Image (cartoon, helix red, strand yellow):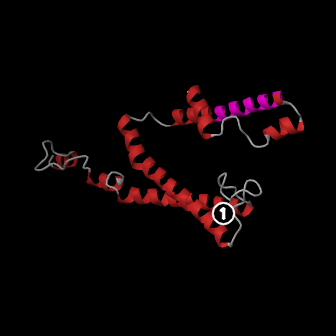
Amino acid sequence: MVVVAAVATTLFLGGWYFPYVHYVAVELAGSQNLYIFLSLIVFMLKMAALLYLYFWLRWTFPRYRYDQLMDLGWKWMIPASLLNIVWTAVTIFALQALHASGALRTLEPARLGEPLLARGLNLTGPGKIVAVAFGVAGLFIAGLFLAYLNRHSRDFNLKKQRREIRLVDVPKGAPAVAPAAAAAENV
């Protein structure tokens, strides 16, 4: 678990990087050792947050069977990740189109004299606001898309499956033992 948290911190959370740690340690304090120490603390805090999340989810939810994990991956995660890829492309296209049309200055070059996208997307303040708005809209679109999948897929539609399940077969013919109320009337 610790190794998985360390690898996930390195790959997905930026490892030991945190904004302004280098500036505070090296530029203001003038100490490379302080930068190394602060970077180590940042890495450990990120790793501790992932371990906390890992323990919390593991202890909260029951153990999934292999077929349940496969269903989760194929029916939810793959459509959501494909939608994420498409929505990210739409966001980048919209940022570039807004800048190219002159409607809004969303991009800036990394250094003066460089081409605009030489080092990736460098967003201005309005560009960051547009990107965040697209991100929030993407969450709602992903939720609606997954709800649509849930509604129109036979595997997901649990209401329909529950209606089709009959827990008890209705007996046919007379009961083997007379009910208590009928037996009391016969006496």
User: Where's residue 29, x and y in %?
Assistant: 89, 35
Write the residue at 38% across / 34% down. Answer: 65
Work out which quarter of the rendered image holds the N terminus and state it.
Answer: top right
The answer to whether residue 56 is magenta is no
Q: Secondary structure at mark 1?
A: helix
Q: Nearer the viewer, residue 179 or 88?
A: 88
Q: In the rendered view, does 42 fall on the left or right side of 163?
A: right
Write the residue at 53% across / 32% down. Answer: 59
The amino acid type, in three-letter code, at marker 1 is: Val
Write the residue at 78% across / 32% down. Answer: 38
Quadrant in the rendering for residue 124: bottom right
Q: Nearer the viewer, residue 59 or 120?
A: 120
Furthest residue to the left? 173
Quadrant in the rendering for residue 10: top right
Magenta residues, start to end: 33-49
The answer to whether residue 39 is magenta is yes
Write down the residue under mark 1: 130
User: Where's residue 117, x and y in %?
Assistant: 65, 57
User: Where's residue 133, x and y in %?
Assistant: 64, 62
Magenta-highlighted stretch: main secondary structure? helix
Write the residue at 68% across / 72% down. Answer: 102
